Image: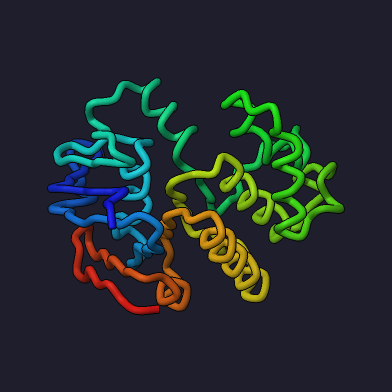
Amino acid sequence: MAKILNVRNLEKSYSSGSKRLKVLQDIHFEVEEQKTFAIVGPSGSGKTTLLGLCAGLDSPDTGSIELCGSELSELGEDERALLRNKHIGFVFQDFQLLPTLTALENVAVPLELQGDKNASKISKDLLEKVGLGDRIHHYPSQLSGGEQQRVAVARAFSNRPSILFADEPTGNLDAETGEKVEALLFELNKEAGTTLVIVTHDIELAHKTQHILRLKGGRIVENQEKQV
């Protein structure tokens, strides 16, 4: 199966006072199309930094990232934004919904950026699929945390992404609500044939994926493909 994400010799550091703090070093891995993939590790291990680099939201100090057939270092900022809008979906721990837009409008944003004339209908169908057909005109402040995350999941799938990056998608939810959102994420992912990359500290969630990459101190300590 083709590789949708290929990471080679990745290193990243940040300035901390007068020192350089190395966050990631010697990172190599690849993700196949339509696979589910988890990045795990303790706080401060570099998980979220790695996710941001893979999605083209930040640039590494050294190394290469090939995403959806494009070498990210060769793309300008506008080209990266275009790649993200066309091929990538995101789900964040803190939902990141636009407070002044309704659930329907939030889901429609990626489609409208692409000029899709069916944005409203597709968004309504997705919201019904995640169980929010009766909440489409509600604003984020009128929704519970679990409902907001379901809107975020619907939005992530609205542009039919090739790959979806989820950063601690259940981190702000109680256990029961988190399980429902997890089930939804995997169900929609399978249905859409999307590649799913999840950053999580939840080992149970990680074990539901087909591949686990474990980080510690900015290095890979385990890179394991598994049968689900």
Tell me which colouring the rendered structure shows. rainbow
Above or below 61: residue 194 = below
Above or below 218: residue 71 = above
Judge from the rendering whether residue 131 lies leftward or rightward of residue 57; answer left or right: right
Judge from the rendering whether residue 37 lies leftward or rightward of residue 11; answer left or right: right
Residue sitting farthest toward the front: 1
Query: Who is closer to the viewer here, 40 or 18?
Result: 40
Residue 22, horizontal then vertical, whole percent: 19, 48
Query: Who is closer to the viewer here, 178 or 46?
Result: 178
Residue 121, horizontal then vertical, whole percent: 75, 39
Viewport quadrant of the C terminus: bottom left
Query: Who is closer to the viewer here, 31 or 148?
Result: 31
Q: Is residue 26 visible?
A: yes
Viewport quadrant of the N terminus: bottom left
Residue 215, horizontal then vertical, whole percent: 26, 64
Judge from the rendering whether residue 78 lies leftward or rightward of residue 154; answer left or right: left
Judge from the rendering whether residue 69 lies leftward or rightward of residue 38; answer left or right: left
Residue 46, horizontal then vertical, whole percent: 30, 55
Who's the residue at 70% across and 50% down the image?
126
Who's the residue at 21% across and 48% down the image?
7
Who's the residue at 24% across and 65% down the image?
216
Who's the residue at 25% across and 72% down the image?
224
Q: Can residue 171 be seen in this view?
A: no
> Total number of numbered labels?
0
